[in-house]
């Protein structure tokens, strides 16, 4: 990475995040492939901020600090579940009543949705939306209610849109300056392609990107948002004088109809943890296929998934081996379950012990939903004598229709973002030596019960000086 970027990187102070961490350089202009080519493990002039306080997604931002929380995630389940279903006999007794209440509630919602649509403009007889529309999907259908979901079976689907209704989630994303400034710069640089054009903003959140598109000269923006933050976004557009040049649409893009046949530009911040967890890429694909004009612009237009290896034995010990003896009790049955759930956190730069390997890439103009489930080989070249205890998965997205192109990276070798990295702990650590190779395959697919959750299988083999030939395979569930 350019030396000036590394020089600005905040230093790690133990496992706690450095609260004085500086903001990221917003617009890295070198394609990440160039930056990664010298990933030899000896770039020690600076290290990424080492925020290691449990799952990164449950942190909350602090004013003036690099965001410590990960956006787009569900609030803790205990905050969502109904009090009557929390434990024991109370939960069992509550189930029939909850089911009956849920049935009555659904009937009320179906009747209320039509009335709400009419009250707010709704959908006209031709199927087009007016200035604002109520989603054809009622909140009861869109948002899972924990009171009717077994906590052991709850997935991100039950919490997804509710989590995005909370302002702290949006504050975390906005305060991630690498993310926000890169999108701002990309929209500004694309002004020649945006001026006088129709823009679609998929998952607009608080509407910042939509307003920047108007500043870049867009003729009109259609901003689609499914979560309840929509009501505040409507107020934001009004407060900033965008009631006529931005049409805010409340609903899932798959379930609404735009008042125009085609758009010139589609922009979206669709990425999730590890790129595809809780991501909206499948929705962006629907928007592209249905609405983008031939020769239209996608922002971003490229995405690349990467992998490297780290030595993280101390933190692994604290996170996993802890369960072997908890105040004298054997809770080791929890250990394996905890290991199979990837950690969303900052991977310390100084823990990296391999070069990076590209495992997949996506072209936003051509990628299909079917290609989001894949299996790919990897080959990691070891950069020093060490133990490899975990795999790290991260991503870059590119805005390449401009010169020079812009890249937003979530690499552990650069400034941390709210996406952090996805860390997968190996069942048995590998003793590796410089220039040895660890190879294998990584398979990724959407969970059968919830497409926003991911299931991984990482298989590997290594022939080393210390331990000889080793191989293994681990399954992970990213929830």
Image (cartoon, helix red, strand yellow):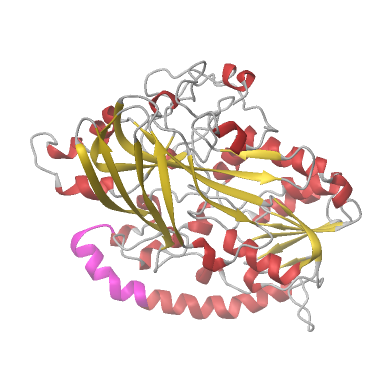
Q: Residue at x 39, y 60 (%)?
A: 155
Image vertical order of residue 316 relative to residue 253, above or below: above
Residue sitting farthest toward the bottom: 125
Q: Nearer the viewer, residue 452 or 60?
A: 452
Q: Nearer the viewer, residue 371 or 299?
A: 371
Image vertical order of residue 356 relative to residue 458, above or below: above
Residue 244 appears in view: no
Question: Is residue 97 one of those drawn in magenta?
Answer: yes
Report x, y in % for residue 196.
Answer: 91, 55
Q: On the image, which quarter does residue 475 sit in?
A: bottom left
Q: On the image, which quarter does residue 447 sit in?
A: bottom left
Residue 192 appears in view: yes
In the rendered structure, the answer to whether residue 10 lies left or right of residue 150 reads right
In the rendered structure, the answer to whether residue 8 lies left or right of residue 421 reads right
Question: Is residue 224 one of those drawn in magenta?
Answer: no
Residue sitting farthest toward the right: 196
Q: Residue at x 31, y 24 (%)?
A: 385
Image vertical order of residue 48 relative to residue 240, above or below: above
Q: Nearer the viewer, residue 283 or 90?
A: 283
Report x, y in % for residue 164.
Answer: 55, 52
Image vertical order of residue 320 relative to residue 334, above or below: above
Report x, y in % for residue 360.
Answer: 52, 52
Report x, y in % for residue 296.
Answer: 80, 60
The span picked out in magenta is 86-99
Q: Quadrant of the N terminus?
A: top right
Q: Number of labelled discs?
A: 0
In the rendered structure, the answer to whether residue 459 lies left or right of residue 134 reads left
The overriding secondary structure of the stretch rendered in magenta is helix
Q: Quadrant of the C terminus?
A: bottom left
């Amino acid at each position: 990475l350019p030396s000036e970027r590394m020089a600005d990187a905040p230093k790690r102070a133990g496992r706690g995040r450095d609260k004085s961490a500086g903001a990221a350089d917003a617009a890295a202009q070198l394609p990440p492939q160039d930056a990664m080519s010298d990933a030899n493990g000896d770039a020690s002039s600076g290290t990424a901020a080492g925020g290691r306080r449990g799952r990164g997604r449950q942190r909350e931002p602090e004013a003036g600090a690099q965001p410590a929380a990960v956006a787009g995630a569900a609030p803790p389940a205990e905050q969502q579940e109904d009090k009557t279903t929390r434990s024991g006999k109370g939960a069992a007794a509550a189930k029939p009543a909850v089911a009956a209440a849920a049935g009555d509630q659904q009937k009320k919602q179906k009747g209320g949705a039509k009335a709400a649509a009419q009250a707010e403009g709704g959908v006209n007889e031709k199927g087009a939306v007016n200035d604002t529309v109520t989603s054809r999907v009622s909140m009861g259908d869109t948002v899972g209610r924990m009171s009717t979901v077994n906590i052991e079976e709850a997935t991100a689907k039950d919490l997804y849109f509710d989590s995005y209704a909370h302002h702290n989630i949006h504050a975390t994303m906005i305060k991630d300056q690498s993310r926000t400034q890169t999108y701002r710069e990309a929209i500004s640089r694309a002004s020649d392609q945006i001026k006088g054009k129709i823009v679609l903003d998929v998952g607009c959140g608080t509407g910042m990107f939509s307003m920047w598109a108007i500043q870049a000269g867009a003729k009109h923006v259609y901003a689609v948002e499914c979560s309840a933050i929509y009501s505040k976004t409507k107020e934001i557009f009004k407060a900033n004088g965008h009631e006529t040049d931005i049409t805010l649409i409340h609903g899932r893009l798959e379930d609404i109809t735009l008042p125009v046949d085609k758009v010139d530009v589609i922009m979206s911040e669709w990425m999730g943890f590890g790129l595809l967890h809780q991501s909206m890429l499948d929705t962006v694909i629907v928007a592209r296929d249905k609405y983008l004009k031939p020769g239209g612009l996608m922002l971003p237009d490229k995405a690349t998934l990467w992998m490297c290896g780290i030595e993280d034995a101390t933190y692994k010990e604290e996170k996993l081996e802890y369960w072997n003896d908890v105040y004298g009790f054997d809770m080791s049955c929890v250990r394996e379950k905890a290991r199979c759930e990837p950690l969303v956190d900052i991977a310390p730069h100084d823990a990296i012990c391999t070069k990076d390997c590209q495992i997949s890439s996506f072209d936003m103009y051509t990628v299909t939903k079917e290609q989001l489930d894949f299996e790919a080989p990897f080959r990691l070249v070891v950069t020093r004598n060490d133990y490899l205890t975990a795999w790290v998965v991260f991503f870059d997205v590119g805005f390449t229709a401009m010169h020079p192109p812009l890249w937003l990276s979530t690499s552990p070798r650069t400034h941390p973002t709210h996406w952090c990295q996805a860390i997968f702990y190996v069942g048995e650590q590998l003793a590796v030596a410089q220039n040895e190779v660890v190879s294998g395959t990584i398979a990724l697919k959407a969970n059968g019960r919830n497409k926003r959750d991911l299931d991984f299988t990482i298989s590997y083999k290594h022939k080393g000086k210390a331990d000889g030939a080793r191989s293994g395979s681990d399954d992970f569930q990213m929830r």
